[in-house]
Amino acid sequence: MKNFALIGAGGYIAPRHMKAIKDTGNVLVAALDKHDSVGILDSYFPDADFFTEFERFDRHLEKQKRLGRKIDFISICSPNYLHDAHIRFGLRIGADVICEKPIVLNPWNIDALLEIEKETGRNIYTILQLRLHPAIAALKEKIEKGPSGKKYKISLRYITSRGHWYHTSWKGDIQKSGGIATNIGVHFFDMLLWIFGNVTSSTVSEHSDQTASGHLELEKASVDWMLSIDANKLPPEAAGAGKRTFRALTIDGEGFEFSDGFTELHTKSYEEILKGNGFRISETIESIKLVHQIRENK
């Protein structure tokens, strides 16, 4: 049984990490969030110690270490701009780190973290759960076995409507979230690069606080993409049905469906990490470079 601590317990994605820790037979020792609306802890680890101040959380983990209850893993679900600092903290206390997407905002942060990994002898893992989705894994295998030299034509549209709150939160601040392409797009970009190869060219048509779009040339695909939190971008059939989210991915004109099968992917990610097979920080470099380039529009 491994001891876990979690940073960002009040966040949207944190319950998936709590569930994964529990499902894999491990224990959450302590959790941190500056907000105290974390009753979700009762559903998974009611005995976990909880802190709203980082300094007290830090002191508690040090105390646990001296008492022989060392933290094996730190799970990070904090706002995007804090990932880098929280990863460094986890490594410094001698823990391996599991960090949500995007692992960092800037490519050069990865270089520095790789150095700290080497210095501390600990490991940084990230959640790239789309790579574990059965339909996506099958697509990758199909493309690898497909005709050599073939270039696929892809269209990606993803609209996930957000209300006024989004622009008041850290997610609406491009300096903190990385903007639309980073915050809601990085998983899709990682998936496309994983299957169709690295970027050979990228152009950005739009990058506002609500919508981003552009064109990618990958080694094996040409990709037109659009990401948005604007409900006005929803297709009439989706809006008419009262849906707030729309996702469409076509490959050579054929729809590719992967809407289902997400429920257990965080648990599967944790299972792989605990077996030593998780996705390492070095595997995120190309997607982080891409979203940074889109953000800077260069």
Image (cartoon, rainbow, N blue to C red):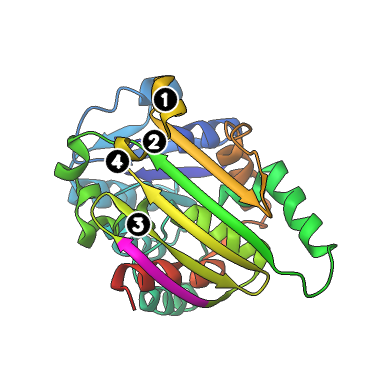
Estimate the spatial distance between the alpha carbons at disc 4 and disc 1, rounded to whole Å.
Answer: 13 Å
Estimate the spatial distance between the alpha carbons at disc 2 and disc 1, rounded to whole Å.
Answer: 9 Å
The part of the chain drawn in magenta is: 201-206
Estimate the spatial distance between the alpha carbons at disc 4 and disc 3, rounded to whole Å.
Answer: 11 Å
Residue type beneath disc 3: Ala
Q: Quadrant of residue 291?
A: bottom left
Estimate the spatial distance between the alpha carbons at disc 4 and disc 2, rounded to whole Å.
Answer: 8 Å
Does residue 97 show up? Answer: no
Pointer 4 with pointer 1, Cβ within 8 A: no
* Mark 4 vs 3, N-terminal side: 3
Please give the label number shown on residue 212: 3
Please tell me which residue lies in front, 263 or 89: 263
Residue type beneath disc 4: Asp
Q: Residue furthest left?
A: 168
Pointer 2 with pointer 1, Cβ within 8 A: yes
Residue type beneath disc 2: Leu
Q: Which residue is mark 2?
A: 234
Estimate the spatial distance between the alpha carbons at disc 3 and disc 1, rounded to whole Å.
Answer: 21 Å
